[in-house]
Image: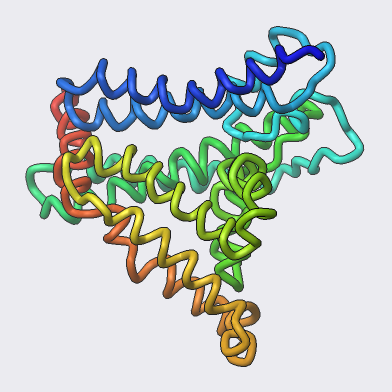
Amino acid sequence: MNDRPNRTRIAAFLGLLILPAFAWWATRDLPAWVNMWALAGSMFFALKLLTLTAAELGTVSFGRIFAYIALWPGMDARAFLLDRPDITPVARPGELAFALLKLFGGLAAGAWATWQVGTAQPVLVGWVGMIGIIFTLHFGLLHVVSWLWRRAGVNAPPIMRAPIAADSLADFWGGRWNAAFADAARRFLFRPTVRRLGARGAGAFVFLVSGLVHEAVVSLPARGGWGGPTLYFLIQGAGIAVEKSPLGKQMNLGSDLRGWVWTALCTLAPVTLLFHAPFVHRVIVPFYQTLHDLLP
């Protein structure tokens, strides 16, 4: 029996620990925002390699694999690398215009934070700056990249899938917000544990791991705020359990307007646990201060 695929997958799993650890070590004495981007990038790259080892692909060109790793943020290797024009979402011109609008809106928020750092309140600069980063990258640039790939006939649906339209917390975290991580979490966390832990236990495990991942990307560079991101994601898991409980179903927390309000409340009310004060003041504000210092 050939155990090479298993050894390759084990090496990929180890990469999820080794690459971020090396990234932290290599950038630990650099500004906190450099440390943050290095940790996030190393985790992204390691997860990409893991999805490749688990995809069971046939013969795929090196160029296509490079494009998947470096030029596409999604985590479904088979969908991206194996041509299936019949299931590729249509890329319409109006969608590109909307993606560009989000991109330029995010850039405008980031520009304001860059110009106002040192003048406006740091907490305001930090939060406007974070919103700018999210809209520039997640909602804007990555949507444009998705559109371009789909225009070329590649199955690369958007990473952010109208999360504001989610009418349940399960819908929000199940694929509307950061579908790339949701896809990877289902494959490598939920499915391997659901038989042993049950659906609720496996779901709670996914949210626990999500919290720990954000501790590494948010709290570790900030050198503070420990436990906040983990608590935030445990609240999300508890919120889904409530909306799926008999009482939650009776109150209609998983659909329609009540579900939308419930989702907004659960995701936004505790958000300062996720993006806590040490992260805002020690990572985001210095990042924009650096950009400000580079201005002529």
- Compared across the picture, whether 27 is left or right of 153 comes to left
Q: Position of residue 218 (x, y in %)?
A: 29, 42
- Compared across the picture, whether 104 is left or right of 250 comes to left
Colour scheme shown = rainbow
Q: Position of residue 97 (x, y in %)?
A: 61, 45
Which part of the image, by quadrant, shows the N terminus? top right
Residues 13 and 78: in front is 13
- Compared across the picture, whether 160 is left or right of 213 comes to right
Q: Position of residue 289 (x, y in %)?
A: 15, 34
Question: Taking the image as drawn, is residue 151 in sight?
Answer: no
- Residue shown at 54%/29% (left/top)? 47
Residue 107, placed above or below residue 193: above
- Residue shown at 23%/50% (left/top)? 226
Which part of the image, by quadrant, shows the C terminus? top left
Q: Position of residue 77 (x, y in %)?
A: 71, 28
Furthest residue toward left: 118
- Residue shown at 41%/21% (left/top)? 18
- Residue shown at 62%/49% (left/top)? 193
Question: Taking the image as drawn, is residue 215 in sight?
Answer: yes
What number of labels is visible?
A: 0
Residue 181, placed above or below residue 277: above
Furthest residue toward right: 86
Residue 78, placed above or below residue 257: above
